[in-house]
Amino acid sequence: MNTPTPEEAQAALRDVDRRRNQTAAAAGHSRWGWIVAGVLIAAYGFLADREPQFIRTWGSAIVLLLLFASLLGNTRLGGSLLRRPVRPRVTPDPASVLWLLLVLAVLIGGTTIAAAMDVPHVALWSGLAGGVLVAAAGPWWQRRILTRETGR
Amino acid sequence: MTEPKLDPALLDPTRLAILALLAGTEWAEFAFVRDSVELSDSALSKRISALSDGGYVEVRKGYVGKRPRTWINLSTTGRVALSAHIAALQEIATRVVRPDPTHAPEQSS
């Protein structure tokens, strides 16, 4: 067996990093996908504020449909249908989970407190805040999760 | 100095590239791996067969509609072998940064 020289080893390691980034790029959703998701969340908040009857009738169905689409996207069949050629391997990271829980707690807690204080258009503002957060921070968050040192 | 434990099968850059691509995934489509490593279908099939025979990867075939699809995933054995190989490469690579002190040239004042 020929042992690689230090320069060859460095080149091989650079290639490994390049491959990892290729996988991360293929596994993630595009920036447009995040923007559309943000707009949908903001639209949900708008509808909840202006058309509460519509959300009472169809809200659960919409949430279940989105949940189903999300689960389907993680299967081989769904990945092919959604043109997502890889399923990323995401290892649990306590720091990321804590951050996610903190952001959710602030959003849900803030909305609950604002609703209790009879702040007008709470659903509209919380939908807008959630939508902007997903559209702006989603790509960054995704990149952070997918390029984390995994399996190395 | 003891030699780092390199995996002979992964000294081939293409095999290493395939395993490195699969390391960040639960599974990947054959076409994605083929396009990423820029091989033909038959050349990649040969490489995947060799890796599968060695227990590094697992292959699953299926259909999406009427179209046949192949998915590849890194096995536990492959993941362990890749991690050990990368650790060995890192050890070799640091020899450039940290040369053997017993052979350091004398400095003139």
Image (cartoon, grey):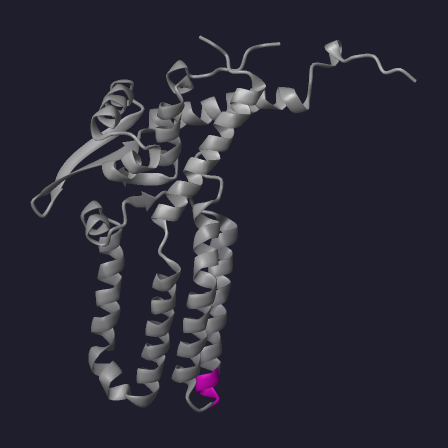
Magenta part of the chain = A114-118
**Splitting the image into 4 quarters, where does residue A68 fall?**
bottom left
Where does residue A91 sit, x and y in percent of width and height?
42, 43
In the rendered image of this protein, does residue A7 appear above or below residue A81?
A: above
- For residue B64, say whether it is visible: yes
Identity of the residue drawn at 64% across and 21% down: B96
Residue for point 39% across, 77% down:
A127
Judging depth in this view, the residue of B87 and A52 nearest the camera is B87
> Does the magenta portion include B78?
no
- The picture quadrant where one finds residue B19 is top left
Lateral position of residue A135 relative to residue A75, left or right = right
Residue A116 magenta-drawn?
yes
The furthest residue to the right: B109
Residue A131 x %, y %: 41, 72
Residue ID at (37%, 16%): B9
The image shows residue A16, relative to residue A126, as above or below, that is: above
Residue in the picture at 28% in, 88% down: A51
Of the pair A41 and A58, the residue shown nearer to us:
A41
Q: Is residue B1 above or below residue A87?
A: above
Q: Position of residue A125 (x, y in %)?
A: 44, 82
Left or right of residue B76, residue A65 in this image: left
